[in-house]
């Protein structure tokens, strides 16, 4: 939630984050803990004869069927490469992709991270990869390049921002343990409560440690990524450094927003931080409005899905009678564009509540369920707003109040997309199926109508 500026500095992480790594042999993570248990030095410390890396992660690229970005942190500076070979092939056949240093300094800490661009993958092929340097290397990790007609599952996590990340870490691990067949995962923004706080980033990453090694991550920028340690707005420096997402060709807002394809789905990841970013530079909305039309028209797929942090509806708030029900600033900007472009599904976040609002077209429900399906994805950290929101006339499904955490799956099939919402214990709370309306498709020649059952 960011309609207000945070008014107090939150309690910082109490316990040392569980920092796991990928290690070849003989090494160990060394964490220096302060008097209050806060991680003061989170840089990897390599022991002789080992290659120790941390936060090894796959980042989504525009075309994951052919390319992948691999990022990680490591103490070693020289000779780092990513080796990739087909699953089952001999190590001698591995192709090598050089790593480049992507160091940055933030929150008073030098983050020694690296990035490597893997190219030349064949769609529909299973690979393995590892980080190597000289005669040392990490363990092999899986890497899959999806086919154009891939059927797959995506894991979707709402806001993970927390004052204590243990709930997030537990739920993210449980969600992954139950869904190791997922091929890709995203977080809908507000990954951390404070976008400058390195200890919070370390805690966030520890929730997705195993998952991000094995499948590509789709980050969405939230407003909390733009807060500094004084709770003032800044540009999202750490977020932009941690996630080398696809370029969008912008001079001013490179990687703030982006798009990619996975199977027969085109995903548009919008940046809804125009208020926060507007303190520093103008034009974020106007630029994205021009870009999304070019992007969708050039790269439309069978399914077209939008991921954006701030929600499209405005909810009434208990105890604030002056606040009316309706559509938010972002809804007024974007919903007509989504109607125009035939977007199928829109995922949002920011209000820390799960609500399935069904299909909305021209700001209304239609009998034939035209327009995108709008899902606000819930909450995945411990910042919860019990009994805050008043139900909206557009709501079709909510979770029992007060809400705890939840996650979602989206299964992309040959003819339908199915979205389900789960509690941390795996209890399914909601499920919605979206199918292409073939009669609409035939009539106007565009794959724009959807209906859900
Ligand atoms: Fe949030
Ligand atoms: Fe937010």
Image (cartoon, grey):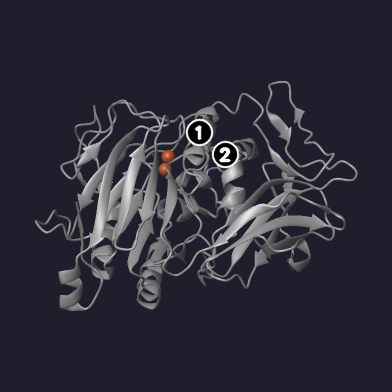
Dividing the image into four equal quarters, which quarter contains ligand 1? top left
Q: Position of residue 344 (x, y in %)?
A: 28, 61
For mark 2, give the secondary structure: helix
Q: Residue at x 33, y 69 (%)?
A: 302
Tell me the quarter of the picture where residue 5 sits: top left
157 with respect to 122 (left or right)? left
Q: Please, which residue is most extreme toward the top here?
A: 35
Q: Is residue 407 above or below residue 385?
A: below
In the displayed structure, 448 sits above or below 277; it is: below
3D distance between C-alphas at marks 1 and 2: 8 Å
Q: Determine the residue positioned at 60% across, 58% down.
A: 143
- Whichever of labels 1 and 2 marks the residue nearer the N terminus, that label is 1
Tag on residue 168?
1
Observer-nearest of 390 and 382: 382
Q: In what element is the residue under mark 1?
A: helix
The quadrant in which residue 372 appears is: bottom left
Q: Residue at x 31, y 25 (%)?
A: 402
Q: Is residue 221 visible?
A: no
Relative depth, front residue between 32 and 273: 32
**Which residue position is annotated with label 2?**
204
Please provide percent x and percent y for residue 12: 59, 28
Query: On the picture, is 390 further left or further right than 40?
Result: left
> Are the residues at dot 1 and dot 2 in contact (C-beta closer than 8 Å)?
yes
Q: Where is residue 155 shown, x and y percent of the image?
A: 44, 47
In-front residue for pair 184/329:
184
Compared to residue 129, the image places residue 74 above or below, namely: above
Q: Seen from this angle, which residue lies furthest left?
A: 367
Describe residue 249's horizontal placement relative to residue 358 as left or right: right
Residue at image coords 51%, 70%: 250
Image location of residue 48, percent across then percent down: 90, 43
């Amino acid at each position: 939630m960011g309609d207000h500026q945070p008014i107090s500095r939150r309690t910082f992480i109490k316990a040392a984050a569980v920092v796991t790594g990928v290690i070849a042999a003989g090494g160990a993570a060394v964490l220096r803990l302060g008097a209050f248990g806060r991680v003061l030095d989170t840089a990897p410390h390599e022991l002789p004869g080992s290659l120790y890396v941390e936060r090894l992660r796959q980042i989504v690229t525009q075309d994951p069927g052919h390319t992948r970005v691999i990022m990680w942190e490591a103490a070693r500076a020289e000779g780092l490469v990513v080796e990739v070979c087909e699953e089952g092939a001999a190590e001698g056949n591995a192709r090598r992709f050089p790593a480049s240093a992507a160091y940055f300094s933030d929150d008073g800490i030098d983050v020694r991270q690296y990035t490597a661009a893997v190219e030349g993958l064949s769609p529909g092929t299973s690979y393995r990869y590892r980080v190597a340097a000289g005669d040392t290397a990490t363990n092999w990790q899986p890497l899959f390049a999806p086919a154009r007609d891939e059927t797959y599952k995506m894991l979707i996590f709402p806001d993970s921002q927390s004052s204590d990340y243990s709930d997030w870490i537990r739920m993210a691990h449980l969600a992954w343990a139950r869904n190791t067949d997922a091929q890709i995962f995203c977080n809908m923004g507000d990954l951390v409560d404070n976008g400058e706080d390195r200890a919070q980033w370390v805690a966030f990453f520890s929730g997705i440690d195993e998952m991000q090694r094995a499948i590509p991550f789709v980050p969405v920028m939230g407003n909390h990524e733009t807060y500094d340690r004084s709770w003032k707005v800044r540009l999202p420096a750490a977020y932009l450094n941690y996630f080398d997402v696809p370029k969008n060709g912008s001079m001013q807002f490179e990687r703030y927003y982006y798009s990619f394809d996975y199977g027969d789905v085109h995903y548009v990841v919008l940046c809804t931080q125009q208020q926060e970013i507007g303190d520093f530079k103008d034009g974020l909305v106007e630029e994205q409005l021009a870009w999304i039309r070019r992007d969708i028209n050039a790269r439309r797929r069978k399914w077209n899905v939008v991921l954006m942090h701030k929600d499209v509806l405005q909810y009434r708030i208990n105890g604030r009678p002056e606040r009316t029900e309706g559509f938010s600033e972002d809804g007024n900007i974007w919903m007509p564009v989504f109607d125009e472009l035939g977007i199928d599904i829109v995922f949002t976040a920011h209000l820390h509540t799960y609500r399935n609002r069904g299909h909305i077209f021209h700001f209304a429900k239609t009998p034939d369920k035209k327009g995108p399906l709008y899902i606000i994805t819930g909450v995945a950290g411990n910042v919860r707003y019990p009994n805050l929101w008043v139900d909206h006339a557009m709501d079709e499904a909510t979770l029992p109040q007060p809400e705890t955490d939840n996650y979602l799956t989206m299964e992309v099939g040959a003819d339908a997309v199915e979205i389900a919402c789960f509690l941390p214990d795996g209890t399914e709370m909601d499920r919605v199926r979206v199918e292409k309306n073939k009669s609409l498709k035939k009539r106007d020649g565009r794959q724009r109508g959807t209906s859900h059952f």
